[in-house]
Image: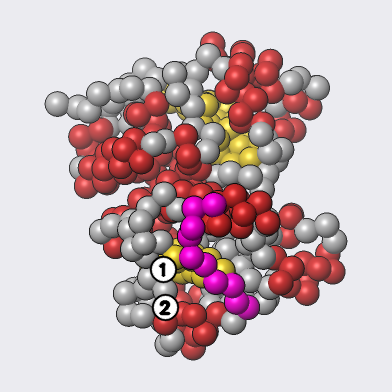
Amino acid sequence: MKHIISPLDLTCNELDDLLSLAGRIYRHPERYSQVCNGKKLATLFYEPSTRTRLSFESAMMNLGGNVLGFSSADSSSVAKGESIADTIRVISYYADICAMRHPKEGAPLVASQFSGIPVINAGDGGHNHPTQTLTDLLTIKELKGDLNNLTIGVCGDLKFGRTVHSLINAMVRYSGIRFIMISPDELKIPEYLRNETLDANNIPYTETNVLEDVLPELDVLYMTRVQRERFFNEEDYIRLKDSFILDNNKMTYANKDMLILHPLPRVNEIATEVDSDPRAVYFKQAHYGVFLRMALIMTLLELPEPE
């Protein structure tokens, strides 16, 4: 039985197979509409989520399966003091696979150690968000045709943003990858990521706090919001939240085939005027997420492709 706690839980070959399957589902979703008939997905979301939870539910329903679960800690037995270990032991009798989001880093890993069913990490604190990363990779592969030889700009909250951390960890396994880090000094990438991932893999990267200067170099721009919930005080959040806003004026500096990705929700870091730009693919990215999660559910449940 396999769990997905980090994007690195998949080998490069497994990842290629998963992305290929997701691409086939995207192109012919009707073929896969009954492959999870009789299967159940448990969504254990200990913190609020809209896109990720509904994307998982949509994925399972698109496959012909059923969904059960909760959308906040207050509506689960954790409010009574139940441990994650006990919760997942019980849920293992109710469902065939589980997607868990938790504010504490490492919680889905703990769950996987006590689970009788595959566990998918749907986000744990500021640590990992593997299915978002897999969605990002699928989007880039489908729209660029390859995951090699890319210059990727990551912009915004690079210190606390789990989607950025997961993306960097995943992309360093491909060849010809270069990163440009665009953030305020207060929100630069953590030292452990710099030392253990970028430097350890000899990945070239530069850092800047001026978005316009580096736009002409980018194949992909990955925007993130400055997250209020990751700050220790309101004053720092208010001071930094508008630091980097992408608008039509800045887009004039970008290449004609650059992709703009964003894990959503978007606040004001991308002006709505950019939405009509064909390079803005963040809503298409959310669409790809459903097909990625469909492929992941099929893979973890070891379900064969339909005839």
Tell me the number on the disc at residue 151: 1
| Amino acid at circle 2 | Glu
Dot 2 and dot 1 residues touching (CB under 8 Å): yes
Nearer-N-terminus badge (2/1): 1
Q: Quadrant of residue 114?
A: top right
Tell me the number on the disc at residue 124: none
CA–CA distance in space, label 2 to label 1 = 7 Å
Q: Circle 1 — which element? A: strand
Q: Which residue appears farthest toward the left when viewing the image? A: 307
Pick whichever, 46 or 124, lies toward us.
124
Query: Magenta part of the protein: which range?
Result: 200-209
Asked whether residue 257 appears in the rendered view, the answer is yes
* Image quarter (top left, top right, bottom left or bottom right) of the N terminus: top left
Pick whichever, 19 or 90, lies toward us.
19
Horizontal side of residue 18 vs 280, given as left or right:
left
Mark 2: few, some, or many residues within 10 Å (few <14, many ≥20)? some
Mark 1: few, some, or many residues within 10 Å (few <14, many ≥20)? some
* Colour scheme of the picture: secondary structure
The kind of secondary structure the magenta stretch mainly shows is loop
Residue occupying image coordinates x 42% and y 78%: 217
Q: Circle 2 — which element? A: helix
Label 2: which residue? Answer: 217
Residue occupying image coordinates x 68% and y 38%: 105
- Above or below: residue 171 compared with residue 89: below
- Above or below: residue 8 compared with residue 181: above
On the image, the x and y values in percent for residue 294 come to 36, 36
Residue occupying image coordinates x 58% and y 44%: 128
Q: Quadrant of residue 218?
A: bottom left
